[in-house]
Image (tube, rainbow, N blue to C red):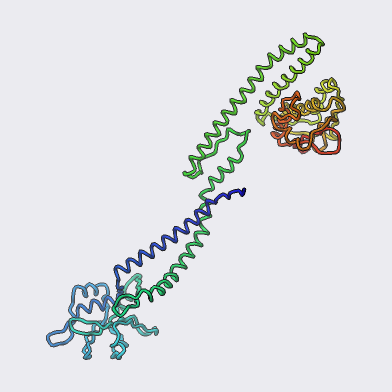
């Protein structure tokens, strides 16, 4: 079954932000289009506004001549553009003028200007004033041609003015309605030309900036995750900090901390129970051993003593597990040669009684490790006892300290099958169900060695028997 891929929250946010921005842009365009459709506006700027104000102000006097009345609209416009100039002509050639008019506009306009409704007049020469607007209008005085400009007013104005002119013409049907079938492709092209660059810039900006922003926002959460990865059985009382965790993740971290607290309390209760049980067993075991010894050399007495010894060994292993809780501050510099020689001396009588010879091969030089000596002795003792119990009852059990800090326990027994070499280090696992051991010795050895930064394993080779090797980090000499 294919393992499901986890989703990246960072890229989920990036995609959703891009989609959100695109949707917002489309909604904005749609709203603008709807507003323009409903309002159908006509945009005016200052020159066009001047013509509109003059259109409503021009009349004919009693003598039929053109007269510009000072309407409120025109007065207000003059306040904003005091230097406005204009030329108003009718079809007979009669005109009325005001303001400082450039010479280029005083000339008689041609028939082309008479045929158009409105036009913006511009000049590319820097020495000629430009920016006038002309429109043929219907007024109270009849059809008129008005030319006006506010350029002088703009040049005399302090500050900054922005002038925008836009004309939108949509194709129409003969009845005057808009022909959208012809207009929509052009409008779509304009929208694409305007929107596509904006969308590309927004998308690129989102792709570049959002991951950095998300990583920065989640940096506290990443630190918390790294601290959580360092939690193990030896520092289970550790609590994850909440200082830099996002508010939305805080309940999860708090729940995790509460779980750690409950696990630590349960683990401590479990350890206390095992320790108390092991201590309580010592007294009845001692009483049983004393009574069994009173039976003398009878076969039943010998078997009873073996069973009592097994029970005593199990109680000792339970107590040995409690030693794993001792802090690292209790460690000291230990000479491997002296430590292994002490264990060999302690087990020599037991090995000889069981039918073995016990040998010790010291290292070629002094080797030192930083360790809890009592724990390390118990780890090695478990391996030696395991060799005595399962080595076949004959041959030699050899303890070897190699030059690189390895400790090997070799026997000449039946050995351990290759497919069982990892299983024997599991708790309560016994290679032979009917054996006397409880299946805790090698597991305890592995825990102690790993607690000291080392490793333990069973070597593979053509020799007879089993070779268990303990690797420990040696201090530089």
In the image, residue 163 above or below residue 88: above
Q: Nearer the viewer, residue 348 or 172?
A: 172
In the image, residue 472 above or below residue 289: below
Q: Is residue 10 visible?
A: yes
Q: Residue furthest top?
A: 294
Q: Nearer the viewer, residue 327 or 38?
A: 38
Left or right: 94 as drawn, with respect to 303: left
Left or right: 283 as drawn, with respect to 415: left
> x, y (%) of residue 308?
74, 17
> x, y (%) of residue 85?
26, 81
In what quadrant of the picture does the C terminus appear?
top right
Q: Quadrant of residue 326?
A: top right
Left or right: 40 as drawn, with respect to 310: left
> x, y (%) of residue 400?
83, 32
Q: Quadrant of residue 235?
A: top right
Residue beneath the point at 23% across and 90% down: 93
> x, y (%) of residue 114?
28, 88
In the image, residue 263 above or below residue 65: above
Q: Quadrant of residue 147?
A: bottom left
Q: Is residue 370 visible?
A: no
Q: Nearer the viewer, residue 95 or 115?
A: 115
How many labels were placed on the picture? 0
Left or right: 148 as drawn, with respect to 198: left
Q: Residue furthest left?
A: 62
In the image, residue 471 above or below residue 358: below
Q: Nearer the viewer, residue 262 or 217?
A: 262
Residue beneath the point at 53% across and 45% down: 220
């Amino acid at each position: 079954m294919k393992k499901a891929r986890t989703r990246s929250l960072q890229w989920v946010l990036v995609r959703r932000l891009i989609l959100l921005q695109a949707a917002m842009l489309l909604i904005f365009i749609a709203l603008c289009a709807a507003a323009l459709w409903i309002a159908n506006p006509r945009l005016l700027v200052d020159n066009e506004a001047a013509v509109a104000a003059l259109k409503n102000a021009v009349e004919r006097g009693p003598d039929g001549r053109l007269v510009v009345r000072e309407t409120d609209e025109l007065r207000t416009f003059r306040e904003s553009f005091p230097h406005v100039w204009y030329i108003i002509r009718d079809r007979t050639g009669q005109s009325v003028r005001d303001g400082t008019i450039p010479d280029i506009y005083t000339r008689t306009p041609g028939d082309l200007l008479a045929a158009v409704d409105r036009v913006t007049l511009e000049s590319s020469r820097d020495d000629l004033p430009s920016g006038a607007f002309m429109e043929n209008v219907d007024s109270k005085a009849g059809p008129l041609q008005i030319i006006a400009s506010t350029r002088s007013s703009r040049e005399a104005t302090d500050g900054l003015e922005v002038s925008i002119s836009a004309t939108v013409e949509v194709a129409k049907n003969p009845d005057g309605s808009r022909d959208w079938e012809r207009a929509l492709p052009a409008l779509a092209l304009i929208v694409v030309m305007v929107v596509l660059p904006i969308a590309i810039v927004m998308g690129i900006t989102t792709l570049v900036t959002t991951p950095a922003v998300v990583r920065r926002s989640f940096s506290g959460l990443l630190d918390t995750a790294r601290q959580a990865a360092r939690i193990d059985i030896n520092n289970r009382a550790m609590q994850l900090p909440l200082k830099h965790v996002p508010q939305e993740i805080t309940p999860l971290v708090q729940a995790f901390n509460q779980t750690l607290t409950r696990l630590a309390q349960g683990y401590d209760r479990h350890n206390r129970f095992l320790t108390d049980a092991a201590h309580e067993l010592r007294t009845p075991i001692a009483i049983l051993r004393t009574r069994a010894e009173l039976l003398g050399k009878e076969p039943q007495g010998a078997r009873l003593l073996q069973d009592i010894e097994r029970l005593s060994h199990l109680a000792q292993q339970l107590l040995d597990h409690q030693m794993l809780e001792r802090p690292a501050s209790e460690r000291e510099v230990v000479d491997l040669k002296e430590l292994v020689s002490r264990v060999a001396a302690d087990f020599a009588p037991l090995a000889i009684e069981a039918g073995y010879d016990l040998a010790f091969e010291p290292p070629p030089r002094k080797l030192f490790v930083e360790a809890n000596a009592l724990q390390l002795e118990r780890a090695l003792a478990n391996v030696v006892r395991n060799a005595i119990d399962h080595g076949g009852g004959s041959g030699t059990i050899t303890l070897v300290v190699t030059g690189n800090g390895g400790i090997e326990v070799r026997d000449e027994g039946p050995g351990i099958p290759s497919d069982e070499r990892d299983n024997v280090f599991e708790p309560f696992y016994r290679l032979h169900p009917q054996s006397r051991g409880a299946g805790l010795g090698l597991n305890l050895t592995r825990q102690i060695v790993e607690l000291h930064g080392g490793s333990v394993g069973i070597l593979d080779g053509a020799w007879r028997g089993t070779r268990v090797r303990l690797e420990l980090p040696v201090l530089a000499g």
